[in-house]
Image (tube, rainbow, N blue to C red):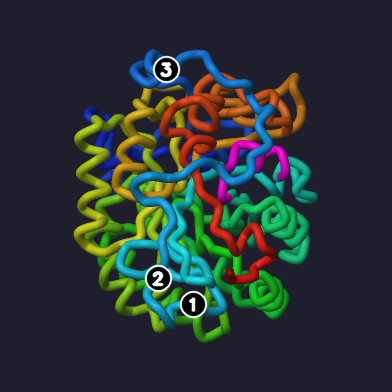
Amino acid sequence: MYERTRRWLCGPQLVLCVACAAALGCGSDRADGGDAGNAGESGQAGASAGEGGTGGGSSGTGGRAAGAGGSGTQPPGETGATLRSRDGALYDSCGEKVVLRGINHPTLYVDRKGEALPEIAKTGANTVRLFWYATHGVKIEEAEASISASVKSGMIPILEMHDSTCKWALDSIVSYWTSPQAIALIKKYEKQLIVNIANETSPPSANEFRTKYSSVVKTMRSAGIHTPLMIDGGNCGRDYSVLLSQGQALVEADPDHNLIFSAHLYDRMSATSYAKLFADAQSKNLTLVVGEFANKTPPGCGAALDYAALISAANDHGAGWLAWSWGDNDPNTDWNSDCGEFDMATTFAASTLRGWGKEVAMTLQASIQKTAVRPKSMLNGGACQ
């Protein structure tokens, strides 16, 4: 979610906000071990989850039937060169409906070779969100190893840029995305890839959010990027109201009409509130995913979040979700140093999954392992059946 130092602003569901700023709400500085800003063991969810599961011994061949929001097919003629967002749902290049269920991974800092991705795949995840930076002097070509490892492991890669976390600074990121090197990489993997434009970039207003992102999307389309473009909520990702209010206008502004909207749900919400959020997105025909969530609210190991209710409500409404996060490969350190619980596993190995991370990945009835479906194209080298 954030860099080693990040600013947390209060999202729409916080009950109390101290010293709120005029435009974006309250800010409290937070130092952490990487990018995470999520995770722990929610009180209610932890009680319901139990201790079962084997932590990571499963082979992860694609999960079980998804139930609500599981696989389906697009109308004839809707196949194409990329994944497609259409009428509030996502379809692969073969026209099969895909509900994203997966995990975030701080790739640039800890795993540029993608060594953790086969282990993440053992959960049955059908997607992984790959943490990257546009302004850290790292060539985008270095992201190919993790993109390739994700595809080979049967997971849709979501490549995202973290530079604008809790800031409103998109121009340098767009320049990186539209460089010849980035275009070549995106073209090579465009059948499987999702481009998450900028992590948690935080606009001063809803109008500015709509205006700027409309321009950004058009610029990226003109450069030749036709994958789904994922757009995070404002206010450090936690303001999903701007997605609901401006999403339709952004889809209309997109020449490809191929957008995914991502809410980072780190504020306390009831099961009813979760259900309403997903229902509201459905009513507007917006393809909504929970791009990040955890077991507690930041900063630090804050109040418990009912992550079991979150994923259950998302599953019931066919909404995708990705947990935060699969950290580094050192059992003696926590990648998320502000709250070690945010590390779902203690190493890259799936066998080291623990606590809420093990529940969300493996043991809850609504978990990745028990509900995720990998589209056939991810299991057949991109070929349609």
For image coordinates 33% across by 79% down, the residue present is: 253
- Residue shown at 59%/49% (left/top)? 128
Closer to the camera in the image, 110 or 185: 185
Residue 46 numbered mark, or none: 3
Q: Name the residue located 36 percent from the left edge and 70 percent from the top edge.
A: 86
* Amino acid type of the residue that numbered disc 1 sits on in the rendered structure: Thr
Quarter occupied by residue 28: top left
Q: Nearer the viewer, mark 2 or mark 3?
A: 2
Label 2 environment density (alpha carbons within 10 Å; few <14, some 14–19, many ≥20): some
Residue 21, compared with residue 184, is above or below; it is: above
Residue 249 at x, y = what percent? 27, 72
Disc 2 vs disc 1: Cβ atoms closer than 8 Å? yes
Residue 79: image tag:
1
Amino acid on which the number 2 mark rests in the picture = Gln
Q: Mark 2 points at which residue?
A: 74
Residue at the far front: name it.
385
Where disc 1 sits, the SS reads: loop
The region drawn magenta spans 118-127
Q: Position of residue 66 (x, y in %)?
A: 43, 45
* 3D distance between C-alphas at marks 1 and 3: 41 Å
User: Which of 325 and 73 lies nearest the eye of the viewer?
Assistant: 73
Residue 268 found in image quarter: top left
